[in-house]
Image: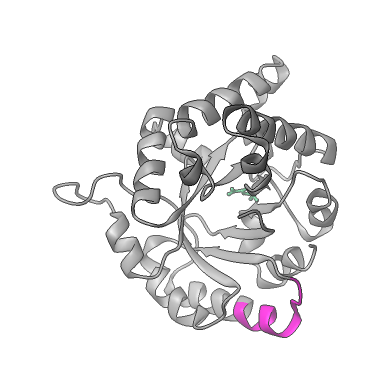
């Protein structure tokens, strides 16, 4: 179901005490200050999921997400985390195909399609990331590249399945760089992605999917990005590590 979403990806940051402090600050600020109906997702490192879930408590507008998963049910995969495990600690969402996973861990579209399917088969919701590097944009191949990532990662899903996917368009050149895509660049790519879904499935399906923008979202640029007709919120890295900034981003809807 299409909704406004602010998701905070903590990446590999914060020890347990710092993570608990951040989560409790966000929960308190959201309770005190946020009156919109946006869904908020906290995405800490795996090892903090249980503690953060306890701090979220019964706050129904705040959900828990994981940054990755393994696609197999379980077994001899040392160092990996299964979807059963994620479910058992309260995760509702799983980020799939973040550009850092694609770049540093060699995750390709075929693997990401398998992970996405496994997330859905386990009753969780994938946040499927796509996005081009700077050289691809400069070569004017960004639509082609994003299409490939969407088609190969998602289009084996049924209509019922894709309705439970959240997509995050994250131009790699804007992640952690302080450079944000312009409102026009974000809107243009989000509309393109929604068009791909309409062509493959139908318009109603495309209109029901949340497409988030990610790449240096801050309190100062969130409002105008979120006002774009096809931008349904943000996947936020750096600014989600500061409770004040993240809450202000949530209040931008
Ligand atoms: C991200 O981690 O997905 C991200 C968009 O990071 P940042 O907001 O720091 O650019």
222 displayed left or right of 62? right
Q: Is residue 29 magenta?
A: yes
Q: Main secondary structure of the magenta part?
A: helix
Q: Which quadrant is the C terminus positioned in?
A: bottom right
Tell me what residue is drawn at x 57 percent, y 72 percent.
62
Inspect this view and state whether residue 105 appears: no
Inspect this view and state whether residue 220 appears: yes
Q: Residue furthest left?
A: 76
Q: Is 55 in front, or is 253?
A: 253
**Residue 105 x/y as whole percent:** 39, 36
Q: Is residue 61 above or below residue 41?
A: below
**Residue 58 x/y as whole percent:** 52, 83
Q: Is residue 15 above or below residue 193?
A: below
Q: Is 178 in front, or is 2?
A: 2
Residue span colored magenta = 27-36
Q: Which quadrant is the N terminus positioned in?
A: bottom right
């Amino acid at each position: 179901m299409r909704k406004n979403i602010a998701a905070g990806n903590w990446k590999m940051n914060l020890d347990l005490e710092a993570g608990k402090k951040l989560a409790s600050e966000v929960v308190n600020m959201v309770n005190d200050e946020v009156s919109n109906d946006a869904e908020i997702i906290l995405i800490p490192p795996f090892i903090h999921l249980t503690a953060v879930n306890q701090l979220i408590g019964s706050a129904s507008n705040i959900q828990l997400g994981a940054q990755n998963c393994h696609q197999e049910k379980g077994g001899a995969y040392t160092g990996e985390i299964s979807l059963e495990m994620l479910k058992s600690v309260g995760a509702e969402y799983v980020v799939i195909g973040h550009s850092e996973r694609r770049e540093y861990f060699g995750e390709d579209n075929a693997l990401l399609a398998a992970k996405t399917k496994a997330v859905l088969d386990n009753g969780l919701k994938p946040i499927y990331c796509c996005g081009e590097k700077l050289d691809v944009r400069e070569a004017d191949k960004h639509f082609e590249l994003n299409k490939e990532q969407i088609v190969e990662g998602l289009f084996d899903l049924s209509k019922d399945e894709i309705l439970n996917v959240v997509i995050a368009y994250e131009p790699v050149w804007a992640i952690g760089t302080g450079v944000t895509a312009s409102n026009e660049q974000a809107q243009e790519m989000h509309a393109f992605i929604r068009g791909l879904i309409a062509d493959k499935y139908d318009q109603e399906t495309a209109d029901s999917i949340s497409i988030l923008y990610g790449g240096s979202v801050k309190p100062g640029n969130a409002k105008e990005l979120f006002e774009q007709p096809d931008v349904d919120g943000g996947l936020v890295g750096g600014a989600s590590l500061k409770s004040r900034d993240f809450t202000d981003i949530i209040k931008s809807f």
